[in-house]
Image: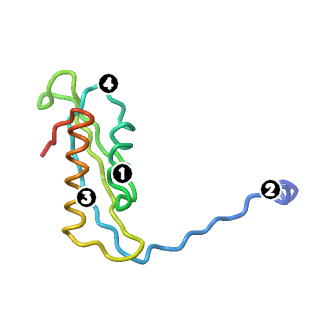
Amino acid sequence: DTEPLYAASKLVPAYRSLPRFPAVLRDLAVVVPLELPNDEVRRVILEVGKPLVEDAQVFDVYTGEQIPQGRKNLAYALRYRSAERTLTDVEVNEAHQRIVDEVKQRLGAALRA
């Protein structure tokens, strides 16, 4: 009988409205030092991308022949969205370029095509 457990639970379902405006998805692949934590790159992406970057998730980590020794390739899926309006290509491109520039400057990353 799970009813007493359910009754004792104080969990209240949390709901969030669906976004009113569409997201723009962009990928970003960078080559960084092997010892650099993936979360550090993500932190910089989210910080620099505020308020337009809604999320950044690593979807690939690669080391191999095409990557210099002591480095790794990290590929991130970035989701851009505004709560007030549909974003333009210009807005997303500018934000994306700021992120690329800062990741290169702060973390010694190289952009990978």
Mark 4 near mark 1, Cβ–Cβ under 8 Å? no
Q: Nearer the viewer, residue 98 or 80?
A: 98
Q: How far is the residue under mark 4 from the one under mark 1?
A: 20 Å
* For marks 3 and 1 on the same chain, the one whose residue lies earlier in the sequence: 1
Going by the numbered disc 2, the residue's amino acid type is Ser
- Depth check, mark 4 against mark 2: the one in front is 4
Question: Residue 69's image quarter?
Answer: top left
Q: Which residue is mark 4?
A: 35
Give how far across and how far down residue 46 sits, in percent: 37, 50
Q: x, y percentage for residue 98?
A: 23, 52
Q: Amino acid at mark 1?
A: Ala
Mark 1 nearby-residue class (10 Å; few <14, some 14–19, many ≥20): many
The kind of secondary structure element at disc 4 is: loop
Secondary structure category for the residue under label 1: strand
Near mark 2 (Cα within 10 A), the count class, few <14, some 14-19 or many ≥20, is few
Name the residue located 35 percent from the left edge and 58 percent from the top edge. 53
Q: Which residue is mark 1?
A: 56
Neighbour tally class for label 4: few under 14, some 14-19, many 20 plus, Cα within 10 Å:
few
Tell me which residue sits at (34%, 68%) in the image.
23
Pointer 2 residue: 9
Labels 3 and 2 touching (C-beta < 8 A): no
In the depicted structure, whether residue 39 falls above or below residue 16 = above
Name the secondary structure under disc 3: helix
